[in-house]
Image (cartoon, rainbow, N blue to C red):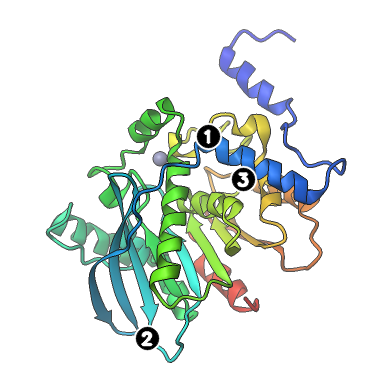
Amino acid sequence: MRIYNSGFYEVARVRHSVPRFRFTKDTSLAEWQRNARQNLSQLLGLPLQAGANTLKILYAREHPGFTEHRFELETEPGYFAQCYLLVPKDKSEMHKLCLCFGGHGSNMHITAGLPDNDPDRSGGELNRRENIRILSETPELNIASYALKSGRAALIVELRAFGEAGDDTPSCTENAKTALLMGRTLIGERVHDAICALDAVLSGFDIDPEGIIATGFSGGGSLAFYLSLLDERIALCAPSCSFCSFEKSIVEISHCLCNHIPGIRRDFEMGDLAGLIYPRRLIVAAGETDPIFPYDGVLDSVRLAREVYFCDTPDSLILLSLKDGHRYYGELIWQTINNINI
Ligand SMILES: [Zn+2]
C-alpha cells in the first residue's frame, strides 16, 4: 500500500501499532503498574516543582445544607490555584470526599453550583449572569450537588486555562502549546494542582482519607482519570464522556490540545491505562450518541480495560450508558456510587 497523504499515514500508523506498555502476563501486575505509572508521569511532564502549598482561606459562607470554603494554594512557585471545598452540614465529624471537575471551558463556580462570583475577581457580574444561565439550562453541570446529596464534601479546583485560571474565553490551546515547549502538559499541570489541593484539604480539614472519589465531565473526566492513575488515594474514579480510545476520539476527531500528551499513544491506549486504577474502582459513563467520544471507542476501551483489569469483583469496572449525547451523567453515576459501600 502506498499513502501520499501524510495525515492518513499518521492515522494508519496509530491503527497498526501496539502500544509499548501493553500489559502481558510476562511480568507481574505490580511491576507493570510501577513501570507504567513512572512512564506516564514522565509523559505528563511530572513531577513539577512544588510551591508552598499553604492553604489560604479567602472566605467561608453558609448555604442551606452546606458550608462553602473558598481557598487558594501556591501549587507551583508563583502559581496560585483557586479552589472550593463544600462541606455538608450534618452530624458527621469526618466527611468523605469527592473531587469534582467540570467540563471543557466551564469554570469552577458552575461545577460548585455557585453562580455568585466574587465581583472583585475576574469576570465579575458578567460571569455571574452567564453562570446562572448555564446552571439553569444544564443543572447536571453542578457536579458538587451530587456529592453533597450523598453526604460527601466536594473539592473543586479551577482547571488551568479555564475560568479564573484563564481568559474570558477558554485559553487552553495557547496555554497547552507553551507548556509543550517546556516539556510540560496542561493535563499534567492540572493533575499536579489536584494532588496539591487534595494534600492541603486532607491536612487542613476534617476529611476521611479513605474512600475518596474523583469524578468529572469531558475534560474534567479526563482529569479525574489521569489523577486516579497516578494518585492511589483515589478509591473510585467516575469519568463521564471522556473514557474512549485515543484512536477513535482524539486521533479521528478534532479536539483541542488539552487532550494531547506527547507519546501517549506510542505507549498506551486508554484501556491500557485503566490497569493503573486496578484494584480500585472505575465507573465509566458514556453517551451512546456522543459525537466527540464515540461509543464504539468507549466499548473498545472498556473491552481492553477488562483484559488488563482482572475484574475479580462485579463492581470494580462498571460501564454505564444512555442513548444520549455528551454530558455529565450525574443521576446514573451517583445512583451507582450510592449503591456501593465506599
Ligand atoms: Zn482545551
User: Residue 79's spot in the image, x, y percent?
Assistant: 30, 46
Residue 232, image x and y in percent? 61, 59
**Quadrant position of residue 3:** top right
Q: Secondary structure at mark 2?
A: loop
Q: Are marks 2 and 1 in contact (CB under 8 Å)?
A: no
Q: Residue at x 31, y 42 (%)?
A: 170
Q: Residue at x 23, y 57 (%)?
A: 130
Identify the mark at residue 303; answer none if there is no mark: none
For marks 1 and 3, give the CA distance: 15 Å
Q: Estimate the spatial distance between the alpha carbons at disc 2 and disc 1, rounded to whole Å.
A: 40 Å
The amino acid on which the numbered mark 3 sits, given as a three-letter code, is Cys
Q: Is residue 130 toward the left or the right of residue 148 in the image?
A: left
Q: Secondary structure at mark 1?
A: loop
Mark 1 or mark 3: whose residue is earlier in sequence:
3
Say what amino acid the circle numbered 2 marks. Lys
Q: Which residue is mark 1?
A: 261
Among the two numbered marks 3 and 2 on one chain, the one whose residue lies closer to the N terminus = 2
Q: As displayed, is residue 8 above or below residue 325?
A: above
Q: Please, what is the three-letter code of the amino acid marked with disc 1?
A: Ile
Residue count near mark 1 (Cα–Cα under 10 Å), binned few <14, some 14–19, many ≥20: some
Quadrant of the displayed image that contains ligand 1: top left
> Is residue 248 at all visible to an observer of this figure?
yes
Q: Nearer the viewer, residue 339 or 295?
A: 339
Q: Nearer the viewer, residue 295 or 337?
A: 337
For disc 2, the neighbor class at 10 Å (few under 14, some 14 to 19, many from 20) is some
Q: Left or right: where does residue 174 sit relative to residue 305? A: left
- State the mark number for residue 244: 3
Disc number lying in front (1 or 3): 1
Between label 3 and label 2, give the one nearer the viewer: 2
Task: Choose the circle earlier in sequence order: 2 or 1.
Answer: 2
Measuring 17% from the left and 63% from the top, which residue is drawn there? 118
Residue occupying the point 41% across, 59% down: 197
